[in-house]
Amino acid sequence: MSVAMRDAFGAKLAELGKTNDKIVVLDADVSSSTKSAIFGKAFPDRFFNVGVAEANLVGVAAGLATAGYHPVVNAFAIFLALKSTDQIRNVFCYNHLPIVIAGAYGGLSDSFDGASHQSITDIAIMRAMPNMEVIVPADSRQAELALEYALQQNTPVYIRLNRNAMPSVPEPANFASKKVIVLKEGKDVTVAANGITAAMANDAAVLLAAKGVDAEILSIPFVKPLDGDGLAASVAKTGNLVTVEEHTVVGGFGSACLEALAKRKMTYAFDAIGVEDRFTETGPYDELLAAYGLSAESIADRVMKLLNK
Amino acid sequence: MDDTLKSLLAEKKGQSLSAVELAALAAGFRLEMFDVLHSRGTGHWGGASSAAEITTSLYFNRMNVDPSNPAWEDRDRFILSKGHASMNLYTILAYKGFFSPEDLPGFRTLGSHLQGHPSMKRTPGVDMSTGALGHGLSIGVGMALAARLSGKKHWTYVLSGEGCLNEGQTWEAAMMAAKYRPERLVYMIDYNGVQLDGTSDDIMPLNPLADKFKAFGWNVAPKLYDGHDTKSLLESYDWMDSDDVWPKAVIYQTVKGKGVSFMEGKSAWHGAPIDIDSYAKGRPELLADIEKKEAAL
């Protein structure tokens, strides 16, 4: 287990604030949850708590960005994606402003708060916006690397963060290359895992190996731009693809993978694991994830079904 | 723009114009807006016209900008939160010298830098892209806070209409502005009383508007200024300079579609194309207004 992504992200933000005085941080009355409060305590002049007002949060950040600052806006992923969609599209993206949008409590990770707080459409929304980059880190280290990367960009970058302490995956050699990260090479099936599902996929590979299936496991944090070449190379080798995401299967990571491969005229067998087109519910996080097929066992089962084994 | 106004602009380039000069210039700009909006058959006449004196006075009397360097860090900022009045802003910016007035007839054509609503990435001098109503004040708060952080003294002006005040985001921003009190932030309201669908009183009553801003903790101008009287506009600037209590809100009483009698105060002229008959009937009124204002020069 690693520390929770939000803790790592909040600490990294405060650390980067020491050497980069252009970082300004905004939060919508959830800074003790998002951990942007760490930055706020260290740099009170560069921290703005706007109250529960996500539309204004984004607008104010845009104003700061026009004057040479690099804002990091923090709020719950679901409310950033839904309550400030207009402002993110028409102000951040249209004007190509350098802003980091940190979506906290991504996916089902605010598990006990239920469907109203679980963000399962944010990736679909964010990736549809021109000029936006979308990163879904697999673990706390990738979250730190995503923040460092995003602060180097002159464009809006959405980083989806997880609430809880979760298993980690090996640190990638070059995260900023935006390439697929090969966690395990294999020849029978490609499991393309987005966000925290990468660790599950890694565990699934062990279960599959016991059944004689040699799975290739990819951690793909960059949903946009997606490394279509890296994905295609793997699928060309295995002929089978299973995408895994903590998100609706409508319009998210799996859809992005299919769009990338469709243009390459490839033939392969496919399955998408994620939340089907439905609302989610309350429960302990691990149990909730498993209920929607997000566990090592479920991934292994779905792979076996795809391979008709 | 006729020769008198062109000479006036050339002669007073870079200087602050007087009330009578601003009045003549605004009348000229209003006709130019009318001509282009008619010729293009698209755009928003009502709100462009109601703000003619407001923007003319701001850019030609008060704002510190450098048309040869639109990205100048110390420039005053202007956000047209009521972005549908884009033709107004484009006319002002062109004659201020940010780009050639010859570009104006290209308004809303494919490939033109004069987009339907203002785009800061396309048009020199546009400080913020707008169009979706209600964004301006939040962005202005951000710009003014940026000035505070970097020790700059520039002003940030946000101009909005009733539509922006219907949007919840404006009131989120109003609360935040009162919390942080960024210096030299002025929220200007072009209060023409008419929206797309009808009068503001019918669509969504805003009164008592000044009291609303006072209740939100703002420094509100002591009276409503006449947004078509340049003397009154200059008086409002005296008020802006009269103390250091921020943020400031000022309400300008205006008339939607001002200058063409049969269009004034009519929601139908919010965004309707100016047809040939209305154009032929309305243009002489605008010409007469220019003549009257020029006579006072």
Image (cartoon, coloured by chain):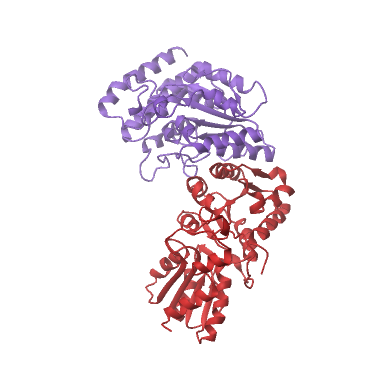
Is residue A37 visible in the rendered image? The answer is yes
**Hue of chain A?**
red
Image quadrant holding the C terminus of chain A, namely bottom left
Image location (x, y in percent) of residue B289? 39, 17
Which chain is rendered purple in the image? B
Image location (x, y in percent) of residue B83? 45, 36
Which residue is depicted at the point 43% across and 67% down? A260
Image location (x, y in percent) of residue A1? 66, 69
State whether residue B19 is above or below residue A61: above
Going by the picture, which residue comes out furthest to the top?
B296
**Along the line of sight, which residue is nearer the eye, B252 or B282?**
B252
**Along the line of sight, which residue is nearer the eye, B32 or A6?**
A6
State whether residue B95 is above or below residue B111: above
**Along the line of sight, which residue is nearer the eye, A170 or A6?**
A6
Which residue is depicted at the point 36% across and 21% down? B264
Going by the picture, which residue comes out furthest to the left?
B277
State whether residue A95 is above or below residue B204: below
Image location (x, y in percent) of residue B151? 70, 37
Going by the picture, which residue comes out furthest to the bottom?
A212
